[in-house]
Amino acid sequence: MAEAAAPAAESLGGGRARAARTVLGQVVLPGEELLLPQQEDAEGPGGTGEQPLLLNAGARSRVRVVCGPGLRRCGDRLLVTKCGRLRHKEPSGGGGGGVYWVDSQQKRYVPVKGDHVIGIVTAKSGDTFKVDVGGSEPASLSYLAFEGATKRNRPNVQVGDLIYGQFVVANKDMEPEMVCIDSCGRANGMGVIGQDGLLFKVTLGLIRKLLAPDCEILQEVGKLYPLEIVFGMNGRIWVKAKTIQQTLILANILEACEHMTTDQRKQIFSRLAES
Amino acid sequence: MRLLEFRGGRGRGQIVSKRGATCGPQSWAVRHRRVRTGYAACTQARTSVRKRQRAWFGLVEGAMQADAKIRTAGGTEPGPQGPGCSLRHFACEQNLLSRPDGSASFLQGDTSILAGVYGPAEVKVSKEIFNKATLEVILRPKIGLPGVAEKSRERLIRNTCEAVVLGTLHPRTSITIVLQVVSDAGSLLACCLNAACIALVDAGVPMRALFCGVTCALDSDGTLVLDPTAKQEKEARAVLTFALDSVAQKLLMSTTKGLYSDAELQQCLAAAQAASQHVFRFYRESLQRRYSKS
């Protein structure tokens, strides 16, 4: 029975962990284990007795690596928990081994501290608003968390309004809390989103792609029509242009951007620019 | 692997998403299809077989080796196993429904299951667990109301998923898996497990490993048949279904029906573990294809 289970075909990485460096940019599956750079040096010779002699027998100095979304620490290895491409970012300052994470495609948002999101006010209970951000529970937003708000000067927020804010508390154990001011007390673009416009939902991967610093989609869209646009990291985009038809066109372009290649996109933009 | 291309796309061999572009009279260079199904709302809606067949463009298909079936004789230890195992042709499709967070359709021969996953989402206070996610599985048969057999299969699938999903990362939430039987031609539970696994991966639910289901049937003369059809299951003296995980082919769940000996159980388990390698390789190829197109 053991013979049949022996890996005649390639196994899914079970029992054989690969070095994280060699897997960068490839698709990794849940259950795979990745070795950090420090460990592969030690395991490279494969225990043939050729390991370098350490002067301080005992603790080896480890490179400090940050474990991003999609990865978990499992002993001294990284366990992949989501399917996607493995990415790595070198550390900007000195020290550390950089960040590893898995770039996966998802629709459901999980609140993360510091993320800017678009929420919909669903209830007013006492001094807080309950805001639906697309996660597993509604976030709470205090009425004092707006620029220039005091106990006497309350913000004008109604049920059904759109709010652009950021999370100050977002972990798995507590109810998420969001605010519409930054750490200096200024609004910085956050707050109630104005009238009209259209709110629609896209996948989280598309939002990250559009918000990447080198994304030209946004510049091309801006050349097309004058518009106002707000991106929420929870997959929600609010867009407003001069007429309803332009707004709808922009919404459809952004939704379709996910599946179009660069050429198709340029084709569509040029067609729209003509008309 | 056969790749079906459809016009307008960039040669997608698989489905990435199927949202329809609804903008007035304008039509885009890339035409999306909207798959109208009622599964996401967990109703008794049924799709016609033809609509399902229309969704077959861009499928990822797994080619299976059709080697000799594994024979066992009595209780003796089998010799070195042949390289092949006769699993039926299978195929899978991902992200085909627009409402659920993750969806997948898995086909094994003529058995076809459609799975949708919602989560991590809100949970009723009566059902919430303080330190992990509440997993719910709903299995709808092709015709009729769900009965006791469906309930027992739901429980088996839920136990398997709970062993694999990292529920502690999302306490007080619910992860719901909805499975709809589109056609049943044998090894239903294994197909349900496979569809559930792909749908969970598609939804981005954190898991500690992948899992797959394999069914074995034992004939009256001791022949072992993997992935039996409905006819073979009916005539078999024992039908065994195993759920195996991807890290070390460990056994997650087993359910058996009929008469078999201890040695036969071990042989079936070994055969299932060998077959699961093929299934996991198919998962890997289909997921790689999905991410290569984006």
Image: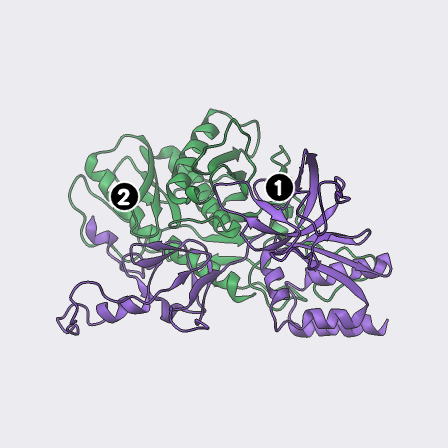
Chain colours: A purple, B green
Q: Are marks 1 and 2 in contact (CB under 8 Å)?
A: no
Q: Is B193 rendered above or below residue B151?
A: below
Report the disc number at residue A240: none
Q: Is B71 rendered above or below residue B137?
A: below
**Residue at the spot 20% in from the left edge and 54% down from the top edge:** B80
Q: Badge 2 sits on which subunit?
A: B
Crowding near the residue tagged with mark 1, few <14, some 14–19, many ≥20 C-alpha atoms within 10 Å:
many
Say whether residue B31 is visible: no
Question: Which of the image's four quarters has the C terminus of chain A?
Answer: bottom right
Q: Which residue, given by chain and number where applicable, does mark 2 sit on?
A: B269
Residue type (three-letter) at the residue carrying disc 1: Ser
Among the 4 quarters of the image, the one containing residue B241: top left
Q: Badge 1 sits on which subunit?
A: A
Among the 4 quarters of the image, the one containing residue A20: bottom left
In the rendered view, does A260 fall on the left or right side of B192? Answer: right
Say whether residue A156 is visible: yes
**Percent coordinates x, y for residue A51 in the rendering:** 16, 72
In the rendered view, does B78 fall on the left or right side of B85? Answer: left
Q: Which residue, given by chain and number where applicable, does mark 1 sit on?
A: A140
Among the 4 quarters of the image, the one containing residue A209: bottom right
